[in-house]
Image (tube, rainbow, N blue to C red):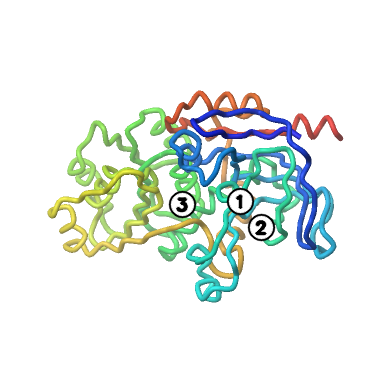
Amino acid sequence: MKSVVIHAGGSVTVEEQPLPQIEARDDVLVQVSCSGLCGSDIPRIFHAGAHFYPITLGHEFCGRVVETGTGVSDLDAGDLVSCVPLQPCFDCEECHRQLWSQCRNYRFIGSRSDGGNREYIVVPRQNLFRLPANTSPVEGAFFEPMTVSLHTIELAGGCRDKEVIIVGAGTIGLLAMLCAKALGARSVTAIDINPERLALSQRLGADYVFNSAEMSASDIRSEMSHRRFDQLILETAGAPQTVELSIQIAGPQAQLGLIGTLHKDLNLSSATFGQILRKELKVLGSWMNYSGAWPGVEWAQATRLFETGKIDLSALIAVQGDADVYAGAVADLNGKPMSGKIMLDFSSHMEGQA
């Protein structure tokens, strides 16, 4: 089978590997349909950020069930499933409290073990989410990243009738925007430094867009003065300057959901820190995408949003192709952020086997 393998130093290769085999009662052999590149994968590829090399990444994927272990009775061959990549121990105190993301002994498919950027993978049953029959493979591959923003919205108590402000209009930000619109936000604002991303935000339904490379925080805050109450700000860019901007533009008692992962130190001035206190901001740290009964309410919510047809993913994808196309697109990034989602698509191979 073909596998996209990452070697130390940023080498991206397509290699033939043996087909994985079912070994445990709860194992499921999955034929991968689609797998997306996550922004968190870029440091793993280009900045020595992986736990080991060589590694096959991929935690945003879906596929068809091929075979199940003897202990699996609720999945059938041909079922479309999405990967739930977190592997909690289910035994520590955090897990007993359903705080899956804080598990003391977790593993993670596509990071701490090889992932779905290959034609076949064996996954424990508890790490598969069965998708409705009308779900497309592309939608299935977007379940994991979409539930990231849904988790933050869940932590904030929902977003209905709130002024939702997305700082960073990358893939996670745009998904957050689509979810907020679908879940009844009063308005949705997108802030970014990239004019193309802002134009895409408008096409996808943003009510307001601001270019923070051209406008100061005070100018943006002034433009939003008539919408300064009941704000939910979602910081998705993961940069020190966008975290600071989020604090500076926030209205009174705004909720600030921090989604983006920082790779540089955040040094706030005393004046900026003082705004957190003076405006009584509610700062929400958000990690991964699980809450409640495993794997979490976010996954069921994503299902409902796709079923209602309110989530259009077509504009988010920059590259979609087979292993060679995918590997070339990833290598071309050379450590830079994606300008749109890069998708590994094995559908032509699957059609050839039909």
Q: Position of residue 303 (x, y in %)?
A: 63, 55
Classify residue 138 by image quadrant: top right
Q: Position of residue 301 (x, y in %)?
A: 58, 59
Q: Position of residue 176 (x, y in %)?
A: 46, 48
Q: Residue furthest left?
A: 271
Of marks 2 and 1, which one's residue comes earlier in the chain?
A: 1
Of marks 3 and 1, which one's residue comes earlier in the chain?
A: 1
Of marks 2 and 3, which one's residue comes earlier in the chain?
A: 2
Q: Secondary structure at mark 2?
A: helix
Q: Secondary structure at mark 3?
A: helix
Q: Secondary structure at mark 1?
A: loop
Left-right relation of 353 to 38: right
Amino acid type of the residue tagged 3 in the rendering: Ala
Residue receiving disc 2? 127
Amino acid type of the residue tagged 2 in the rendering: Asn
Q: Calculate the distance from the C-alpha at mark 2 to the C-alpha at mark 3.
A: 26 Å
Q: Which mark is residue 134?
A: none
Of 75 and 161, which appears nearest the observer?
Answer: 75
Task: Please tell me whether mark 3 or mark 1 is closer to you in this view.
Answer: 1
Residue at the image point whose x is 50% and y is 43% from the top:
50
Residue receiving disc 1? 109
Q: Which mark is residue 180?
A: 3
2 and 1 marks in contact (CB < 8 Å): yes
